[in-house]
Amino acid sequence: MSEILVPNQGILFMKVGVHAKESLEDIIARKTQEIEEAGFALWGYGGSTCHPSTMVQPFAKEHAALGKPVVLCMQEMDSKHFADPVRAEEFSVDKVHWHPIHPSIHVLGSRYALAIKGLRHEEFDLPLDKTHVALGKSLGRAGNKYIAGRVDKACLNLGDTINVPAGPDDPIVKINLVAELCDPYAVFLRNT
């Protein structure tokens, strides 16, 4: 069982695959190099379920105050994200104060990005029914009920029974890739 699967651990669950016409393998190689060169990487994403300032930042800061990092747990999927691979030039934590993105970091075709370190392959089963949404309008909802349809990411807390073996009918997702969120956790992106 993964060391990540402990009660009350905060995770950001995300389905990942092709993004901005780039294969997942190429993204992983590029992000690993960015972490080596800049000390962290920006993992681009879109959608509305993990808004940087109203969801991810408060979630990550709450766990950081307890001395527990939030772990990005990624499930590989078939993706058809073929947006143009345009590199973001600036980032902001609040959409007011903008800063240039480190020249070694290339975040492509995204509105938002997660700040990550420690990117690595790690495979384990995540029982989504033993997780719950950590904040927002769906606070407390079981992860397996929330991650459905077009919802492909969520800020989740692991429940007290996370390390109890799953039953044969429990909803399980395969995690293939993990990273640790690092300050500033999530940012807005733009081109100048």
Image: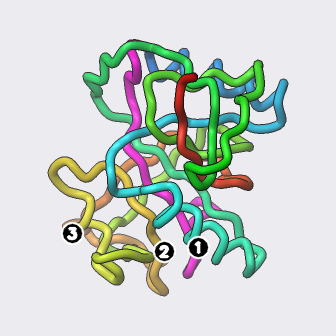
For residue 18, which quarter of the picture? Answer: top left
- Mark 3 burial class by Cα count in 10 Å: few <14, some 14-19, many 20+: few
Residue at the spot 57% in from the left edge and 71% down from the top edge: 58
- Mark 2 burial class by Cα count in 10 Å: few <14, some 14-19, many 20+: many
**Quick one: label 2 or label 3, which is nearer the N terminus?**
3
Residue 68 in percent (x, y) is at 71, 72
Identify the disc placed on residue 164.
none
Above or below, comparing residue 19 to residue 48 in the picture: above
Residue nearest the viewer, comparing 142 with 57: 57
Residue 1 in percent (x, y) is at 56, 62
Q: Which residue is mark 3?
A: 145
Give the Cα separation between the discs numbered 3 and 1: 19 Å
In magenta, the rendered stretch is 1-21
SS assignment for the magenta stretch, majority: loop
Residue at the spot 64% in from the left edge and 54% down from the top edge: 185
Q: Which residue is mark 2?
A: 157
**Quick one: label 2 or label 1, which is nearer the N terminus?**
1
Residue 144 in percent (x, y) is at 26, 66
Give the Cα separation between the discs numbered 2 and 3: 14 Å
Q: Which residue is mark 1?
A: 9
User: Are the residues at dot 2 and dot 1 in contact (C-beta closer than 8 Å)?
Assistant: yes
Residue nearest the viewer, comparing 93 with 58: 93
- Mark 1 burial class by Cα count in 10 Å: few <14, some 14-19, many 20+: some
